[in-house]
């Protein structure tokens, strides 16, 4: 997965609406120890929302 | 009849750069053509999946194509749920893309500062009227659209797979995700065709900043299609339909269009995906640029000189397309098959070629369907290696 993750990191998006993991913890007041789990859940759905925004809504 | 496994292998081999047993064909037929052939009204039949599948079943039972044809409607149920202004049903039921401008030229700085915030604050409510409704109607509109796409899409996907097995069609995935060239995205969904071309003269630096800002979104959109799973070139293929490039002056193309597209393609490729490109219109004066892309991009050409395209693009990449679909309307059986053989003589040697039309059959009356049958049979026989 390193190439995939490297490209994802290279194309990191800073947005008020699509949050980076560290901002998810802060916004929702989640214990910092949950960062890896937040990455699995919030990271996934924010990606899917991004995909929906850029495909279905741009079709 | 050749079975699904055999036909799937033809595509798998070509996409991997290997020589297949014969040239595979992927003659594009839109769901609207299938619906019309089956006697359904496009104004009503596209709002569900039952009639689409029934029409596709009739078409695929009749023609011995390598791929499933006449399926996947334009999802008007989704566009209605969100009140789309960019994707609307015409009076005859065929979906149209009006040339609408959503973003004002004075808003470039907002787009550049936070493109996703700009999109959801400004672009989306303007492009999709349901998103401009007050809470909770706007939230329900978004939820309905997502669920409609997911639930109806899954039913279509499963039914299509079963139909592919039933009628001996290839199941090799060709498209699994969609992304866009950054300049095309700016033109098609923000500034319009004419607006984007005018902005190149009036606000050149803003246009450059905008396409550079949009480029990471184009990459991330493609990456998100696997929902976090590791992609493979065979199983995850991202589609780019190229729109604006051939309408631009070559020097504008080189400055504003090509660099961010090339970066997008390389990033998506390096992340592990396969690449599928539809080179809309005639790319002959820009043809050398494809040499700058990663190997084995699958490129569908519409128009151009097949010999030059084979020579300049066909050694590094996979080529598809260029058979003049209009000939199926006006040509005799002999003329239709002779043209197919002429194209195969040029494109088939060395492999890395998939037979297809220059553009898909969109409507039932667009072709003589007897000729369609003669054509796919001819390719299967004459395309043997």
Image: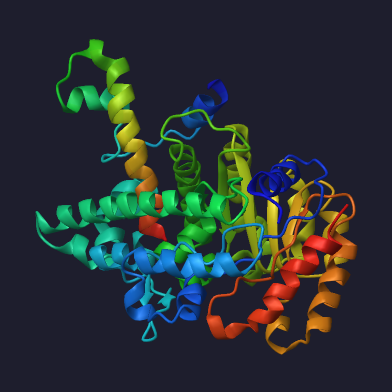
Q: Residue at x 82, y 75 (%)?
A: B337
Colour basis: rainbow
Quadrant housing the N terminus of chain B: bottom right
Q: Write the residue at 61% across / 66% down.
A: B28
Q: Find residue B307 and report its horizontal and vertical position in percent.
A: 88, 64
Q: Position of residue B380 (x, y in %)?
A: 78, 61
B325 over A12 or under it: above or below:
below
Give the residue at the far top of this rendering: A33
Q: Residue at x 33, y 23 (%)?
A: A40
User: Which residue is at the front of the view, A31 or B258?
Assistant: A31
Work out which residue is located at the far bottom of the displayed protein and give it.
Answer: B330
Q: Is residue A19 left or right of residue B173?
A: left
Report if residue B176 is visible in the image: yes
Give B163 or B329, whichever is nearer the viewer: B163
Instruction: From this view, report whether residue B49 is shown above or below residue B88.
Output: above
In the image, residue B4 above or below residue A43: below
Which residue appears farthest toward the left when viewing the image? Answer: B135
At x 81%, y 71%, the residue is B340
Residue B198, given in percent of the width and then of the height, sits at: 51, 72
């Amino acid at each position: 997965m390193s190439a995939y993750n490297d490209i994802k990191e290279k194309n990191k998006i800073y947005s008020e609406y699509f949050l980076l993991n560290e901002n998810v913890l802060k916004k929702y007041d989640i214990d910092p120890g949950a960062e890896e789990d937040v990455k699995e859940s919030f990271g996934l759905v924010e990606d899917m929302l991004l995909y929906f925004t850029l495909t279905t809504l741009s079709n | 009849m050749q079975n699904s496994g055999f036909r799937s292998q033809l595509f798998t081999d070509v996409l991997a750069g290997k020589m297949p047993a014969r040239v595979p064909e992927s003659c594009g037929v839109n769901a609207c053509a299938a619906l019309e052939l089956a006697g359904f009204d496009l104004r009503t039949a596209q709002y569900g999946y039952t009639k689409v599948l029934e029409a596709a079943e009739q078409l695929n039972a009749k023609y011995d194509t390598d791929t499933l044809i006449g399926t996947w409607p334009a999802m008007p149920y989704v566009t209605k749920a969100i009140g789309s202004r960019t994707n609307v049903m015409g009076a005859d039921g065929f979906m149209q893309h009006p040339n609408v401008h959503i973003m004002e030229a004075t808003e470039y700085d907002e787009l550049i500062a936070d493109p996703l915030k700009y999109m959801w604050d400004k672009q989306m409510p303007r492009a999709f009227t349901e998103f401009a409704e007050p809470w909770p109607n706007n939230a329900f509109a978004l939820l309905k659209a997502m669920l409609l796409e997911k639930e109806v899409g899954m039913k279509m996907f499963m039914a299509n797979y079963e139909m592919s097995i039933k009628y001996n069609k290839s199941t090799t995935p060709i498209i699994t995700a969609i992304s866009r060239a950054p300049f095309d995205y700016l033109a098609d969904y923000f500034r319009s065709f004419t607006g984007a071309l005018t902005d190149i003269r009036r606000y050149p630096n803003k246009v450059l900043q905008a396409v550079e800002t949009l480029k990471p979104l184009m990459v991330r959109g493609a990456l998100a299609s696997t929902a976090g799973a590791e992609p493979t070139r065979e199983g995850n293929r991202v589609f780019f339909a190229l729109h604006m490039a051939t309408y631009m002056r070559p020097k504008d193309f080189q400055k504003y269009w090509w660099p961010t597209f090339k970066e997008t393609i390389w990033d998506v490729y390096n992340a592990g995906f396969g690449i599928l490109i539809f080179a809309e219109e005639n790319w002959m004066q820009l043809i050398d640029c494809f040499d700058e892309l990663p190997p084995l991009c699958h490129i569908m050409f519409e128009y151009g000189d097949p010999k030059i395209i084979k020579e300049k693009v066909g050694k590094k990449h996979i080529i598809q397309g260029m058979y003049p679909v209009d000939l199926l309307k006006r040509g005799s059986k002999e003329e239709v098959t002779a043209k197919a053989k002429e194209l195969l003589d040029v494109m088939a040697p060395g492999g890395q070629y998939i037979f297809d039309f220059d553009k898909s059959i969109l409507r039932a009356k667009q072709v003589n369907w007897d000729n369609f049958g003669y054509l796919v049979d001819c390719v299967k026989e004459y395309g043997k290696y």
